[in-house]
């Protein structure tokens, strides 16, 4: 990219918390942003919080713009397909849905003149250190160069990125995010079923369980549609089935299951765990 005039306008189709977080990063990096939402009051609220503009007529605003679809995953496909019907489609289209395979058909309807690359910010809207997180750029069939173009936008925003195909992405998200969300909900459900007071449960928490309990509270704070989308996905279900198989093996042979476990380089894992848990409780709980 040359100068500021070469930067595309970024339109967020949806104005939820993640759209606002990305818009804030974009504004700080010199991009002009705008919001469109089926609920105009939400878009107006996003503009007051982040800056930029609110769009009413999307068709006239698209040309020369990068449109990032930031709706619930169940609505993203129809939003992308709708852009293919415009007389003057946008310069580029992306989305931030959690799972990607279900969006390929919608992207294939876009003209080749419109760049198309899906993306997945692997952090939440309250993440503070953006350089500590990654953005997955998910390559669509025959669109690798389009992801290279989007990478320049992500790089300017100060985010780290990598490219991956849709199937690998969805499988790994089912394992990592899907497993975490399912465990969070299950832990909360089991704790509720114990029939003891929250205060007594709190006193019995060891460090590792306290971290799991924080996970369950974090998942519970997410929008219900997102939790359902993640836990209900087939890749999450496959990951949980394999996790159950692993748990059964651990119960049969705990020592054997630990063999071959690799330390990723943390010199004091338990010390790090205490620092995370105690720091979180001191600042937020």
Image (cartoon, helix red, strand yellow):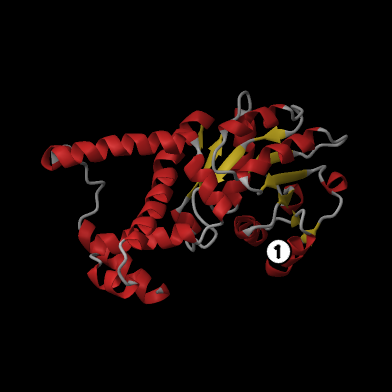
Pick the residue in front: 255 or 62. Answer: 255
The residue wearing badge 1 is: 46
Q: Position of residue 100 (x, y in %)?
A: 57, 35
Q: Residue at x 27, y 35 (%)?
A: 245
Q: Is 14 positioned to the left or the right of 261 in the image?
A: right
Q: From this view, report whether residue 56 is shown above or below residue 151.
A: below
Q: From this view, report whether residue 73 is shown above or below residue 284.
A: above
Q: Quadrant of the N terminus?
A: top right
Q: From this view, report whether residue 44 is shown above or below residue 72.
A: below
Q: Quadrant of the C terminus?
A: bottom left
Q: Is 230 positioned to the left or the right of 95 in the image?
A: left
What secondary structure is marked by label 1? helix
Q: Is 213 positioned to the left or the right of 21 in the image?
A: left
Q: Residue at x 71, y 51 (%)?
A: 12
Q: Position of residue 193 (x, y in %)?
A: 34, 60
Report if residue 114 is visible in the image.
yes
Q: Residue at x 63, y 28 (%)?
A: 143
Q: Residue at x 64, y 55 (%)?
A: 19
Q: Position of residue 226 (x, y in %)?
A: 55, 50
Q: Is 8 positioned to the left or the right of 20 in the image?
A: right
Report if residue 162 is visible in the image.
no
Which residue lies most toward the top here?
Answer: 142
Pick the residue in front: 30 or 235. Answer: 235
Tell me the crowding category of disc 1: few under 14, some 14 to 19, or many 20 or more residues within 10 angstroms, Cα based. Answer: many
Q: Position of residue 212 (x, y in %)?
A: 33, 58
The quarter holding residue 147 reads top right
């Amino acid at each position: 990219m040359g100068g500021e005039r070469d930067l595309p306008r970024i339109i967020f189709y949806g104005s939820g918390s993640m759209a606002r977080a990305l818009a804030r990063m974009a504004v700080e990096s010199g991009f002009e942003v705008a919001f469109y939402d089926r609920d105009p009051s939400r878009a107006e609220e996003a503009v007051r919080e982040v800056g930029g503009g609110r769009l009413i007529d999307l068709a006239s605003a698209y040309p020369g713009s990068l449109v990032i679809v930031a709706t619930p995953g169940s609505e993203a496909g129809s939003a992308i397909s709708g852009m293919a019907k415009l007389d003057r489609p946008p310069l580029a289209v992306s989305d931030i849905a959690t799972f990607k395979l279900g969006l390929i058909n919608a992207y294939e309807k876009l003209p080749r003149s419109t760049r198309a690359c899906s993306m997945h910010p692997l952090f939440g809207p309250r993440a503070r250190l953006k350089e500590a997180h990654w953005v997955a750029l998910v390559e669509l069939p025959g669109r690798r160069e389009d992801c290279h173009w989007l990478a320049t936008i992500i790089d300017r925003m100060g985010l780290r990125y990598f490219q991956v195909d849709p199937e690998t992405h969805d499988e790994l998200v089912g394992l990592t995010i899907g497993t975490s969300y399912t465990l969070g909900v299950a832990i909360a459900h089991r704790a509720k079923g114990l029939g003891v007071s929250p205060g007594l449960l709190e006193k019995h928490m060891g460090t590792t369980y306290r971290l799991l309990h924080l996970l369950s509270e974090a998942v519970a704070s997410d929008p219900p549609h997102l939790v359902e989308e993640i836990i209900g996905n087939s890749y999450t279900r496959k990951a949980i089935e394999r996790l159950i198989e692993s748990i059964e093996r651990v119960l049969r042979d705990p020592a054997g299951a630990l063999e071959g476990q690799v330390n990723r380089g943390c010199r004091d894992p338990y010390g790090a765990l205490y620092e995370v848990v105690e720091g979180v409780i001191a600042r937020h709980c």
